[in-house]
Image (spheres, rainbow, N blue to C red):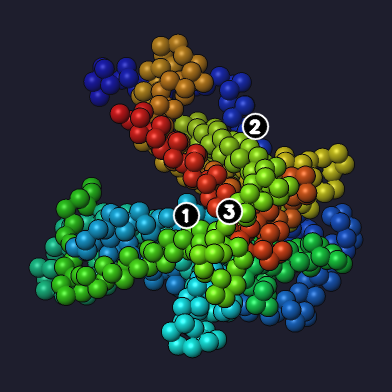
Amino acid sequence: MTAAGHAAAAPQAKRRLPARERALFAAIALLAVVMVSYPVVLVFLRSISTGDIGSPLTLEWLSALVDSGRSREALINTAIYTAGSSSLAMILGVGLSFLAARTDMPGSRILGLMAMMPILVPPFILVVGWVALADPNAGLINIAASALAGPRTVLVNINTMPGLIWMTGLFLTPYVYLLVAAGFRNCDPAMEEAARVSGASRLRLLTTVILPLQRPALLAALLLVVIMSAGDFIIPSTVGLKARIYMLPSLIWQNESSFPQRPGLAAAQSMLLVVIGLVCIYFQRRALQRGGRYTLVAGKGANVSQFALGRLRYPLTALAFLFALCSSVLPILAVGCMAFMRFWAPYAMKLENVTLRHFHYMLFEYPQVWPSARHSLLLGVLGASLCVLLALALCWYMVRMRGRFAGLVQYAMVIPLGVPGIALGVGILSFWILVPGGIYGTLWILLLAYVTAHIPVAIQFVGSALHRIHTDLEEASRISGRSLIGTIRRIDLPLMRPALIGCWLLIYVVILREISLVILLYNPSTIVLSVGLMDVWGSGFYPELAVYSLLLMVLGLIPVALLSRYAQFSAD
């Protein structure tokens, strides 16, 4: 090494942060570990206690879980629902990502944007939209079928297990697309060329080279959608309960909120979801750790060849865009149509039934709208901001400082990924309901739940961005006399701005539509928009429900548009 190299390396090797700063970051890291770990521990303790935590231990609730016919039915339904929706999401997500990334299909960029729309649209809106489209009595599709084929013709019925699987599969497809599409674009062209030279057909090339390279991403996507579908609350507790299809998340909600309450049984049912989630996380981490067996030989895959679709080019393009329309555009249009109808019933689609009175009622007379909108906006902004700030501190501790507890923090931060929202809510409730004068019944417990659930997502964004910044830049700033905070503010934050904005936007949108996490933690004075939607759903007034849904969508999209414009302006 040259003298200059030694001089550059010396400060990096010798310079250490002051003990005070290291202690501060270590304290933040340990606090974060406790924050994400205690809900899981408390769910387990509550499931083996006769009453509140600290009561004598018992196996009563675990045996009731085994003996209860309703619990067994819910477990079987949850397994069918999870398997079906996960399989549908994988088929659609992998197929769309391959068509958009590796074929000569026209409009692939537009298709990619349309495929991602369900992430930006709250799932409750998609539920309302599909009820408007496929309800057996008043769905637009069945109304059209009755007009063509005769009265009472039911072409599709959303109030069935296949209907639930269809809605959830469409909702989960963008997550599969996100995880898999980048891998298809970055395949090693040298390996594909070698397979072609050896005489491999296109099908053999796909099955022996391209898909094996995507094995870690495919398995990670599968495990993610399994966790999300097993813990999904919105669809099972709305359309599912209406159709008398019981699943674990809806039973947990009923046991916690209905009379007589059975919190021990709810905790035992939550433990089933926790075990499913943590097992999935374990296999996901093993798959990612073995990812090196499927890494690229070349540095990038910019020159990957495109598969020619031939005669199937335009039929497959039409099917792909039809899916994109069905997944988000049609449900949103159906919600908009429902909002302007005087009432929602068969043959109500007439010009004389168009009205604005539902907008006036919901915006100016319905008492819950504006308080819940304020709460949602406040919690979305604070929750996303705290997640980003906490993730920045934790990633600095793990990546830059390599603190004593870095490994513990890294493993603890994946726990919320494997715990469904309803189970995490049970754990948080189990602790704070026992603390006199605590935060139960306030907005603070909702904020704590949001940050606990979504900090792993923020860590993925921030950690990836921090890894791309060379430490020499930070070291030069420290040598010039800037403090640690000054270095982060002047060096790291400007370079990480796109990732931080993207992270903030994603968490804000997810918080705004979150319902399973907070359904057990709110009270009438802390209601949020997503929970308010459940109340309106229970009343059965579909036009008002549609107006409420559109308000939630607008509240989510306005900050997305503003920050995206700011990011584009900053880049220019």
Residue projecting furthest to the top: 481
The secondary structure type at the circle numbered 1 is helix
Residue depicted at x 71% and y 58%: 535
Residue depicted at x 64% and y 43%: 373
Disc 3 to disc 1: CB gap under 8 Å: no
Q: Earlier in the sequence, mark 3 or mark 2?
A: 2
Tell me the mark number nearer the camera, choosing from 1 and 2.
1
Give the Cα distance between marks 3 and 1.
29 Å
Left-right relation of 515 to 476: right
Using the image as rendered, state which of residue 190 and residue 426 is in the foreground: 426
Give the Cα distance between marks 1 and 2.
34 Å
Residue depicted at x 79% and y 61%: 257
Q: Earlier in the sequence, mark 1 or mark 2?
A: 2
Image quadrant assignment for residue 473: top left
The percent coordinates of residue 104 (x first, y second) are: 19, 63
Residue depicted at x 82% and y 40%: 438
| Image quarter in which the C terminus is found | top left
Q: Earlier in the sequence, mark 3 or mark 1?
A: 1
Instruction: Name the amino acid, label 3.
Output: Leu
Using the image as rendered, state which of residue 370 and residue 420 is in the foreground: 370
Please name the residue that numbered disc 2 is placed on: 27
Please name the residue that numbered disc 3 is placed on: 356
Left-right relation of 180 to 400: left
Q: Residues within 10 Å of mark 3 (few under 14, many from 20)?
A: few
Please name the residue that numbered disc 1 is placed on: 119
Using the image as rendered, state which of residue 547 and residue 302 is in the foreground: 547
Question: Relative to 364, is 317 above or below?
Answer: below
Q: Residues within 10 Å of mark 2 (few under 14, many from 20)?
A: few
